[in-house]
């Protein structure tokens, strides 16, 4: 009885500890500068596209195996190794000289994100579910998103100022220290006990047997609940467009004569809007309804992409994309988690990262190639046109199927 109460109290402390962990993880001064850093070291846009493509290829191939680590070996263990790989990737990014070494660093970085991607959210949601408080997830997810965007704001402003005034050494060394501190927080998380019997059963099958069984059962659940696939494919396509702008606009603005601090201010503005809209996601969904959220906000994204591509007000339109990112992230993660059983949670959430990686593998190097061969303006116009065509196709599918059913 006493052990049970201690376990419940420890689960409750996962929430504030998660806030601390995310704050330390999200403040990464290299966040808005790695492309500029590598460009200054002589890398071309095409090479940067290859590196980012390699990052997402690794993510695509390793998402399910790393999701299995979280589901079978524990979310805490997965998080620990995720931060360890990420710290290693930062060291390589700063000290690595050759293209192959930088490629290895991007593989490490991808593995770090893979190990964290499903594990952190699964640990948080299952902690709340075991305590009977899963209805608090949307609010907590909004706060988590605000911490993410707040960390991005600090990173963009502090990183840009340090790079411009002090040099890149003062960008990387604080990033090393914060990554190490986040790693030291992980052992203090309490592992949820949900789905322990299923976890033990899968472990008894051995490594490859457990991988095959967990993957098969996860896909079966997605087939039984098609709304999961609908939401995953739709959301990650949006995030791919936003992420591509985020990276290539840095290089574009640097080439137009902006310094790192000014670029950081623009990126911070987008992050601020994203964080604020994430906090209001629940209220927005209640006010205008799920279907309108899923129809209107992708349309707003298309308009913002057109503004970036065809007007001189690129910074303003890019900042507006933050509203879309923050609201959709919080709303859709809540929908998804309510449709996923605990024993499959980390693995199915890894499918979401797989979709994003696949989109980025196809799109990101192509933008870099077009930018190098022609111009980034041409690449942005192509991105906006593609987004319009895909939105019209998405709208037709949405109206035909009625979109996803909001989980109860």
Image (cartoon, rainbow, N blue to C red):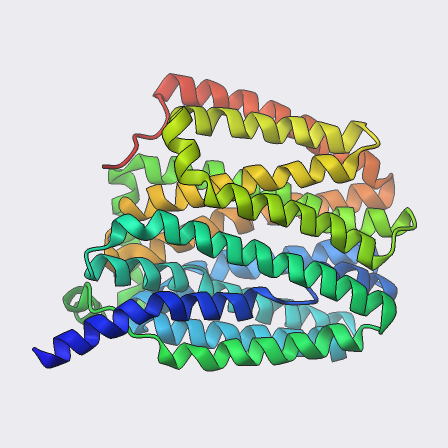
Q: Position of residue 37 (x, y in %)?
A: 80, 65
Percent x, y of residue 65: 40, 64
Residue 205 visible in rendering: no
Rendered-image quadrant of the C terminus: top left
2, 25: nearer the viewer: 2
Rendering quarter of residue 362? top right
Vertical relation: 64 (above or below) 325? below
Quarter of the image that includes the N terminus:
bottom left
Q: Residue at x 17, y 64 (%)?
A: 198
Outermost residue toward the right in this view = 257
Q: Is residue 262 left or right of residue 141?
A: right
Q: Is residue 109 above or below residue 384?
A: below
Q: Vertically, is 162 above or below 136?
A: below
Quarter of the rendering containing residue 16: bottom left
Residue drawn at 74 percent across, 72 percent down: 171
The x, y position of residue 296, in whole percent, is 51, 25
Q: Who's the residue at 58% across and 57% down the image?
A: 150
Query: Would residue 88 appear left or right of 232 to someone viewing this image?
Result: right
Observer-nearest residue: 41 or 328?
Answer: 328
- The percent position of residue 31, horizontal first and vertical second, equals 67, 62
Kindly identify the residue that appears in the image at 80 percent across and 60 percent down. Answer: 36
> Count the marks: how many?
0
Residue at far left of view: 1
Q: Nearer the viewer, residue 279 or 363?
A: 279
For this view, does 216 lie left or right of residue 170?
Answer: left
- Viewer can see residue 352: yes
């Amino acid at each position: 009885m006493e052990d049970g109460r201690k376990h419940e109290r420890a689960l409750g402390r996962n929430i504030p500890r998660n806030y601390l962990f995310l704050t330390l993880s999200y403040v990464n001064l290299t966040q808005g500068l790695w492309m500029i850093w590598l460009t200054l070291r002589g890398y071309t846009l095409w090479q940067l596209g290859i590196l980012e493509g390699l990052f997402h290829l690794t993510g695509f191939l390793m998402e399910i195996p790393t999701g299995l680590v979280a589901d079978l070996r524990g979310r805490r263990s997965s998080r620990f190794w995720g931060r360890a790989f990420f710290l290693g990737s930062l060291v390589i990014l700063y000290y690595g000289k050759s293209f192959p070494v930088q490629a290895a660093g991007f593989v490490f970085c991808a593995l770090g994100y893979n190990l964290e991607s499903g594990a952190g959210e699964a640990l948080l949601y299952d902690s709340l579910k075991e305590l009977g408080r899963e209805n608090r997830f949307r609010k907590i997810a909004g706060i988590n998103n605000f911490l993410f965007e707040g960390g991005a704001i600090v990173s963009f402003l502090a990183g840009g100022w340090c790079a411009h005034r002090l040099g890149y050494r003062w960008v990387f060394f604080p990033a090393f220290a914060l990554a190490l501190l986040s790693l030291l927080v992980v052992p203090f998380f309490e592992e949820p006990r949900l789905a322990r019997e299923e976890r033990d059963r899968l472990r008894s099958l051995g490594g490859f047997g457990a991988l095959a069984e967990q993957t098969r059962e996860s896909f079966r659940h997605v087939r039984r609940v098609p709304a999961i696939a609908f939401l995953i494919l739709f959301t990650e396509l949006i995030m791919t467009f936003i992420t591509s702008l985020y990276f290539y606009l840095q290089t574009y603005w640097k080439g137009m004569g902006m310094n790192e601090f000014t670029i950081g201010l623009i990126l911070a503005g987008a992050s601020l809007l994203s964080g604020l809209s994430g906090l209001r996601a629940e209220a927005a969904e209640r006010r205008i309804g799920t279907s309108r959220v899923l129809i209107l906000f992708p349309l707003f994204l298309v308009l913002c992409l057109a503004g970036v591509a065809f007007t001189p007000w690129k910074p303003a339109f890019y900042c507006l994309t933050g509203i879309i990112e923050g609201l959709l992230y919080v709303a859709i993660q809540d929908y998804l988690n309510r449709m996923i059983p605990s024993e499959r949670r980390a693995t199915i959430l890894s499918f979401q990262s797989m979709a994003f990686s696949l989109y980025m593998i196809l799109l990101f190097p192509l933008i870099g190639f077009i930018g190098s061969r022609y111009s980034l303006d041409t690449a942005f116009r192509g991105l906006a046109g593609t987004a319009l065509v895909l939105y019209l196709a998405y709208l037709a599918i949405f109206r035909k199927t009625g979109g996803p059913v909001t989980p109860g």
